[in-house]
Amino acid sequence: MLGLGCGSVAAITWLALRMDLIDREGHPLHLTLRAPLFWFWLLWEIVKANGQVIRVILDPKLPISPRRFRVPTSQKTDIGRVIYANSITLTPGTICLDVNETELDIHALTADGELGLQSGQMDQLVSRVEGH
Amino acid sequence: MMFEVAAVALFPAMFLALARAIAGPTVYDRVLAVNTFGTFTVLMIAVLGFMTDQKDFIDIALAYALINFIGTIAVLKFFAVGDFGYQQESKK
Amino acid sequence: MMPSLLDGLSWLLLLSGCACLLISAIGLIRMPDLFTRMHAAGIGDTLGAILVLAGLMLQSGLSITLIKLVLILFFLLFTSPTACHALARAALAGGQKPLLAEPNADNSPAEQSPS
């Protein structure tokens, strides 16, 4: 029974690919192969950023220095920018406030979070996931 | 044993989130606190399902995770627009 | 030997996850401003959920429950940044000003020491 279901799903996916029904925005199938590696890297980033924010919260003096700044993006498509903005918001300590064509508006909790984003490593990796 | 400990540890966290929802100075603080409270509730339901060995609870947690997100977006849209989108339709 | 190792690992994951959730709730109370509170809530949404659900996954073994737990984790990880971003945009549109360490320097490369 389960095999029948899996088979029909695979068949329909293949048919839709052949008929060019899958538009690249709504069903980003071309991203599925490269994304998991990026997720593992992102998981490690989340763990590191969590360590920093937890240390800030548990510090009795509460050493926050909130700041707002802009970072440029190098992604070409909308979905690449969405992945980048969501990855930024997912790592604690940095929140994406606004998105436009060329740059993102970021709110960061500490100076470390800002330095990590200004180095642009995540930007390059998201561009590589985006591919093309 | 371990699930009981986890559930007991989750209670004060939910209580603190609820306290922020009651005390929050602005509407957005309350929405944020309720969203966090919803995430805690999802984890709580999952832990309770394992504690009582009724795995059907996991389905409830799954549904709650979706409803939590949709509810947050709906409330935010309500406060940003003032109603549930009739203005935008009439502008078209 | 093997089951006790799994039990110990899932104990560790569950307890550290609950500690993360507690710390995130404490941060929610301690932080002075809406946008800094969102950073604190982010801990519970990401690392807390990951650790607690990973601890439960080790207990469930290979079954349908494991798949459901993975689905819950994916929903939480996909929806929480979206909700956070929507909240930040709504708060900015509603006239909330983020509390900044240096109020006038909006775009400067901030190298100032935390006050």
Image: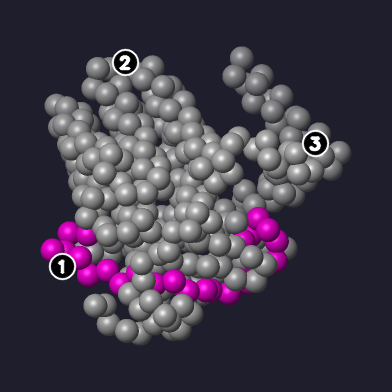
Letter of the chain that mark 1 sits on in the rendering:
A
Letter of the chain that mark 2 sits on in the rendering:
B
Amino acid under disc 2:
Gln
**Which of the two residues, C76 or C55, is positioned nearer the viewer here?**
C76
The mark lying in front, picked from 3 and 1, is: 1
Q: Choose top left, top right, bottom left or bottom right for residue C17.
A: top left
Amino acid under disc 3:
Ala
Left or right: where does residue A28 sit relative to residue A92? Answer: right
Amino acid under disc 1:
Lys
Q: For mark 3, what is the residue?
A: A16
The part of the chain drawn in magenta is: A57-81
Letter of the chain that mark 3 sits on in the rendering:
A
Give the numbered dot on residue B54: 2
Q: Image height check: is B71 above or below A35?
A: above
Q: Choose top left, top right, bottom left or bottom right for residue C3.
A: top left
User: Magenta stretch containing residue A80, yes or no?
Assistant: yes
C-alpha distance separating marks 3 and 2: 39 Å
